[in-house]
Image (tube, rainbow, N blue to C red):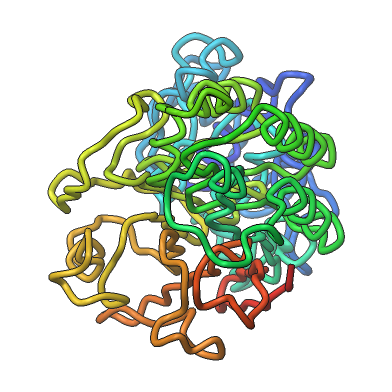
């Protein structure tokens, strides 16, 4: 067996990983590794496992290679593949000093303990390895290692999210508080019904997640409305539908109420995030649906829940925003501030073209909040547009009839379907 055998080094390092799996790792991750090493239903059609290839395509044994290139038990000197230390969270499972293989395209070390939320991401990394690694004898020319269509992370997989914005829970309190502008039909608005309807649609459509782009609360909100909203969010969590969010301008105001019957909405938002009924997005990727889709978010004024104090600066500079890359999957950015090209630069809080141009992350779609009407009051086409580089931008409008443009138009939420090659959307009227 010649020096630097890719097949043997992959087989040995993956075997170390497989033997290190804890009992609570995701079962599909275990099955994927088993299939690659020893054979199983997740291998691509016609592909042989690395174990069989090790026997049929190499002249020597793995043990002989480990004696020549390692400590006799396992390979420690790798020259044909890239290896790295395990993730910090995985080091407790792996033998001291052992290295794990790095996915050749993503440059990410393979994980050990994989949750159900991470499994599709982990399998996508494993699928980067060759079906027939270089060995002493050539293979049959096969290129697919795993049956991607048979996996939860398969190429044909779709992720669906329910896009919601500007619920303004407590908006009807403006009648009593006399604060803020009011639409003439304010007595027809029931924000408790709004949040309950959001949950109903999410469950009916069986979405993977709900994404809220800010102004969850109005600037004055009562305890009964918050209790109703908390109940709906808890039930969504029990339904297995997480709710991801950023904060809007009115969420900041809700943290500093002035009316005696209003309560501190900031405290409530903190509590929902602690309870896990809301998950705040950030400039680091938040993977959903097992890693098929990564969500990013920038709250109004770039001020998140930890800095929520009732006020914020409306200045939002692109230079203050830097996104951490995700290892795989599609990427969606959520914003609340007014953006170009929806508005002219002089009227926008952020130049979206400039933000995307400087970003190290390529976004497949941008979801925005804050606007209470479609562009040009065009209810047919005014909710979507494109940036200069062709990135689609969507707004879904307020989830209640709180804008003047909704006198004779129904509010709605938007179901977005994301696949490897396409993004599509459909409205659900409230």
158 to 289, vertically: above or below: below
260 to 142, vertically: above or below: above
Q: Is residue 67 left or right of residue 358?
A: right
Query: In the rendered image, is residue 85 in sight?
Result: yes
Q: Nearer the viewer, residue 104 or 367?
A: 367
Q: Nearer the viewer, residue 276 or 379?
A: 379
Residue 411 occupies quadrant: bottom right
Q: Position of residue 397 (x, y in %)?
A: 53, 68
Residue 409 occupies quadrant: bottom right
Q: Position of residue 264 (x, y in %)?
A: 51, 23
Query: In the rendered image, is residue 136 in sight?
Result: no
Q: Position of residue 5 (x, y in %)?
A: 46, 45
Q: Is residue 106 left or right of residue 44?
A: left
Q: How many marks?
A: 0
Q: Nearer the viewer, residue 69 or 331?
A: 331
Q: Position of residue 390 (x, y in %)?
A: 34, 82
């Amino acid at each position: 067996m010649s020096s630097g055998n890719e097949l043997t080094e992959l087989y040995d390092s993956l075997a170390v990983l497989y033997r290190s799996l804890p009992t609570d790792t995701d079962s599909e991750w275990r099955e994927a590794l088993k299939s690659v090493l020893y054979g199983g239903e997740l291998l691509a059609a016609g592909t042989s496992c690395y174990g069989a290839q090790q026997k049929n395509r190499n002249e020597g044994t793995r043990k002989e290679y480990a004696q020549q290139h390692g400590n006799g038990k396992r390979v420690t000197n790798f020259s044909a593949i890239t290896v790295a230390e395990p993730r910090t969270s995985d080091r407790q499972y792996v033998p001291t000093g052992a290295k794990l293989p790095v996915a050749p395209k993503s440059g990410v070390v393979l994980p050990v303990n994989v949750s159900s939320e991470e499994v599709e991401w982990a399998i996508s990394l494993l699928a980067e390895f060759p079906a027939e690694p270089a060995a002493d004898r050539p293979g049959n020319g096969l290129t697919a290692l795993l049956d991607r269509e048979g996996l939860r992370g398969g190429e044909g997989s779709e992720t669906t999210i329910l896009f919601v914005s500007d619920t303004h829970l407590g908006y009807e309190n403006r009648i009593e508080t006399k604060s803020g502008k009011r639409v003439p039909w304010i007595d027809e608005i029931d924000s408790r019904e709004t949040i309950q309807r959001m949950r109903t649609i999410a469950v009916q459509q069986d979405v993977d997640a709900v994404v809220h782009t800010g102004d969850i609360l109005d600037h004055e909100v009562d305890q009964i409305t918050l209790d109703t909203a908390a109940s709906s969010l808890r039930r969504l969590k029990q339904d297995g539908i997480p709710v991801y969010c950023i904060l809007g301008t009115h969420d900041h105001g809700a943290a500093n109420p002035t009316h005696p019957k209003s309560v501190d909405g900031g405290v409530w938002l903190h509590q929902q995030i602690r309870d896990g009924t809301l998950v705040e997005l950030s400039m680091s990727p938040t993977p959903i649906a097992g890693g098929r889709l990564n969500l990013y978010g920038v709250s109004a004024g770039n001020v998140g829940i930890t800095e929520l104090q009732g006020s914020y600066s409306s200045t939002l500079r692109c230079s203050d925003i830097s996104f951490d890359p995700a290892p795989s999957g599609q990427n969606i950015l959520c914003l609340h501030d007014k953006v170009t090209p929806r508005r002219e630069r002089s009227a926008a809080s952020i130049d979206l073209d400039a933000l995307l141009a400087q970003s190290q992350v390529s976004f497949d779609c941008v979801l925005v909040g804050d606007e209470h009407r479609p562009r040009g009051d065009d209810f047919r086409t005014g909710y979507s547009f494109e940036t200069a580089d062709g990135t689609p931008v969507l707004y879904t409008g307020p989830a209640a009839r709180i804008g003047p443009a909704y006198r004779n138009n129904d509010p709605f939420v938007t179901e977005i379907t994301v696949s490897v090659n396409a993004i599509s959307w459909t409205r659900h009227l409230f």
